[in-house]
Amino acid sequence: MTAPATISWLKYGWETSFAAVSTSIDKAFGHGVRVSSLNPKNNMEKIYSCGHRNAQKIVPLKFEGSTSIEFVLSSPWFLKAVMGTTSVTGTGPYTHTFGEYDSIPSFTIENDIATNTATVRKLLGCVASNTVISSAVGEKVTVRMDIDYANETKSSTTSSVVDESFDVFTFAHGSVEMPNGTTIADVQNFEISFGNNPDLIWGHGSRFAQSAPVLNRAYDLKASMAFEDNTMLEQFYGASSGPSADVSEAATMELTFDNGGAGTNQRQVNLLFAGVQLNDHNLPQDPLSRMVEDVTIPLESATVTAINNTATCP
């Protein structure tokens, strides 16, 4: 039977050692999960010899796995894969802090496809390469995770679907402040990317990666807002009258999604960035359209927290 995507599903679980299948594959990424790509490569190389125009051998080299997953922002637990560590305070609601760390945890993704002969793939040694959180007026908040992985297994024994239990966040739950405490009015859309730059390591004796240390961390924001005043332009200049020789940074920038609930009903994801600079500023002008200014903003560091009534990060 040809497989529609309605008979496939994903779930994930943290690994205790790199590329060793997780024993607790019981977590949902969020609502509205889509697999935009699932693309392992064998890196086949053709071998040519003198006296022949055709390849004499084709041999596999490094196995490289990659997948991209999209979902609607709901629970915050995927942020552990992005930031590295978690800690919790409070007694309900609880505040979960996803701290910057010099390594990130690997996880196993299980992809079940329930055709007549089921296909169940477990992607091992998954690491979050780049993660983008996007929000636009009139839309839900979405997440895209680009993931590298080291190996995979295949079987035909499916397991149950894991559904997301948290409600979704939409643009109406969001706010943008720069510096934190000062709201930026009329933000039309934004996307914030978290780049971990994992470097999968291969060694002699196996064509599968053995570890995935992370290199430099990169945070970058793109935003568009209805043009009302010179605030962003002057921040870009570093002065009020034109470009400054030394452009000073804004101390902080804060993106918050909050459902507006009180006490144990509150759900919030908060992204607080420090070291904020405007890299470029664009102000296209069309007599038939309102003016919207676009900015790109590199950021130095992040503090990520989530508030909800779950005592521990699963």
Image (cartoon, rainbow, N blue to C red):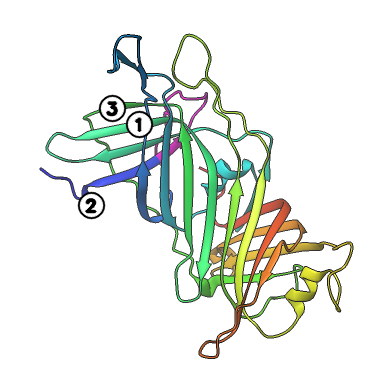
Report crowding for label 1: few under 14, some 14 to 19, many 20 or more residues within 10 A (C-alpha). Answer: many
Q: Amino acid at mark 2?
A: Thr
Instruction: Name the spot of residue 196 as percent of width and height, x first.
Output: 61, 41
Pick the residue in front: 9 or 57. 57
The numbered dot on residue 154 is 3
* Residue occupying image coordinates x 52% and y 62%: 134
Instruction: Mark 3 or mark 1: name the one nearer the start of the chain.
Output: 1
For residue 187, above or below residue 194: below
- Answer with left or right where residue 176 lies relative to residue 277: left
**Which stretch appears magenta?**
12-28
Whichever of labels 1 and 2 marks the residue nearer the N terminus, that label is 2
* Mark 1 vs mark 2, CA separation in Å: 19 Å
User: Would you place residue 263 above or below residue 227 in this image?
Assistant: above
SS of the residue at dot 2?
helix
Q: Is residue 298 magenta?
A: no
Q: Nearer the viewer, residue 222 or 75?
A: 222
- Residue 91 visible somewhere in the drawing: no
Instruction: Indicate the position of residue 161 as horizontal and vertical percent values.
Output: 30, 45
| Quarter assignment of residue 241 | bottom right
Q: Separation of disc 3 and disc 2 at Cα? A: 20 Å
Please, what is the three-letter code of the amino acid marked with disc 3? Answer: Lys
**What residue appears at the point 31 percent right and 32 percent down from the top-left corner?**
121
Q: Label for residue 122?
A: 1
Q: Secondary structure at mark 1?
A: strand
The residue that label 2 is drawn on is 6
> With 187 as the anchor, is 303 left or right in this view?
right
